[in-house]
Structures are given as C-alpha cells and as structure tokens.
Image (cartoon, grey):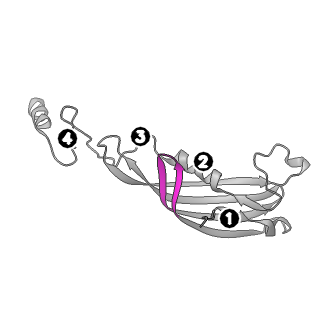
Amino acid sequence: MKQTNPFRINVRFLIHEAVGAYREFEIESPRLTLDENLELENLKCELRVSRVQQGILASIHATAECGLDCVRCLEPFAQKIETAFDELFAFHLRQNQNAEIYLPENGMMDLLPLLREYLVIEVPFCPVCRPDCKGLCDICGANLNLGTCEHQTERNAENE
C-alpha cells in the first residue's frame, strides 16, 4: 500500500478567492526521514495558506523530535527542534517572473521539500544532551555524568 504525502495540500479552492482569504491545517506525521542519517519523530505542523495578490502564501510552524548523540558524552538523546517560515507559491504571471516557487496548475502544493530544508537547518551541529554535560574522561573514556573515575579523582587532588 502506497503511503500518501500528508504535506501535499490542494489549495486550488483559494485561487479564485479574494485576497485575504485563508485556511488553516494541522498535519502530523509519526516519522519523517530528512536524510539517510537523520529521522524525525512526532512531527507536528501548523499550516496557514492565504490568498495574496501574487499567489498563495504558506505560513508554517513545525516541531519535531530527533534522536542525536551528544558530542560530549556520546550518549543518545532526543532533541526537540522547531521551525517557522513563510513561503510564497507565486502564480504564473508576468509580474511574478522572479519568483522562486510557483504554484502548480493543479493547485497541489508540496510542502515536504521546504519542510525538510528548514528542519535540517534547525538540527544542532554540535548537539549536547544537557548544558551541564561533563563529557568523557580524556584518559579512560568514562562517562563523567555517571560518576568520577580514578583519573578525575587524581586531577582534583592535584588541583587542591
């Protein structure tokens, strides 16, 4: 059974509405693969599509959790990420020749590529499980969040 894309929205009904008309959607997805090494869970997306003079404006706020490994202690943890953005899907008109994204003639907006792009930007480059993470002992590799090792005890004695 083919899974449908919940981020593909038909906005054809807005094309002939007055400027200012809008519709709101809530979209949820249990999993979303951003790339081969990164998968999001519990993706929640609030979408507002509005008819504007140039086309359809998509305003999106999305949250999700992603499993990462802490760069200090190397333990896996869940990181909440969040993004909000607006993108114009322009009509194919002469005054919109410089638009980056055009609304397809069938009125189907595919938000998934945009959503992936904006969510990837929000994934931390050096994720840390918590601000006070102590990391690993640079000699024996013990996780210092779980307790001290003999090397840390020796260093503390030398510093006193």
Going from N to C along the chain, the mark reached first, 2 or 3, is: 2
Going from N to C along the chain, the mark reached first, 1 or 3, is: 1
Q: Residues within 10 Å of mark 3 (few under 14, many from 20)?
A: few
Q: In the image as oriented, which residue stretches furthest toward the top? A: 158
Instruction: Tell which tag, 3 or 4, sits nearer the viewer.
Output: 4
Range of residues picked out in magenta: 30-42
Q: Amino acid at mark 4?
A: Ala
Instruction: Tell which tag, 2 or 3, sits nearer the viewer.
Output: 2
Foreground residue among 96 and 139: 139
Decide whether residue 32 is among the magenta residues: yes
Residue bearing mark 3: 126
Q: Is residue 152 left or right of residue 54?
A: left
Q: Is residue 160 above or below residue 143?
A: above
Q: Amino acid at mark 3?
A: Cys
Q: Position of residue 156 (x, y in %)?
A: 12, 35
User: Disc 4 versus disc 1: distance between alpha carbons?
Assistant: 49 Å
SS label for mark 1 = strand
Which quadrant of the view contains residue 155?
A: top left
Instruction: Tell which tag, 4 or 1, sits nearer the viewer.
Output: 4
- Are dots 3 and 4 in contact, CB under 8 Å? no
Instruction: Tell which tag, 2 or 1, sits nearer the viewer.
Output: 2
Taking the spot 22% from the left edge, 47% from the top edge, the residue there is 145
Q: Position of residue 30 (x, y in %)?
A: 50, 64
Q: Is residue 153 above or below residue 63?
A: above
SS label for mark 4 = loop
Going from N to C along the chain, the mark reached first, 2 or 4, is: 2
Picture disc at residue 142: 4
Residue bearing mark 1: 48
Which quadrant of the view contains residue 160?
A: top left
Residue bearing mark 2: 117
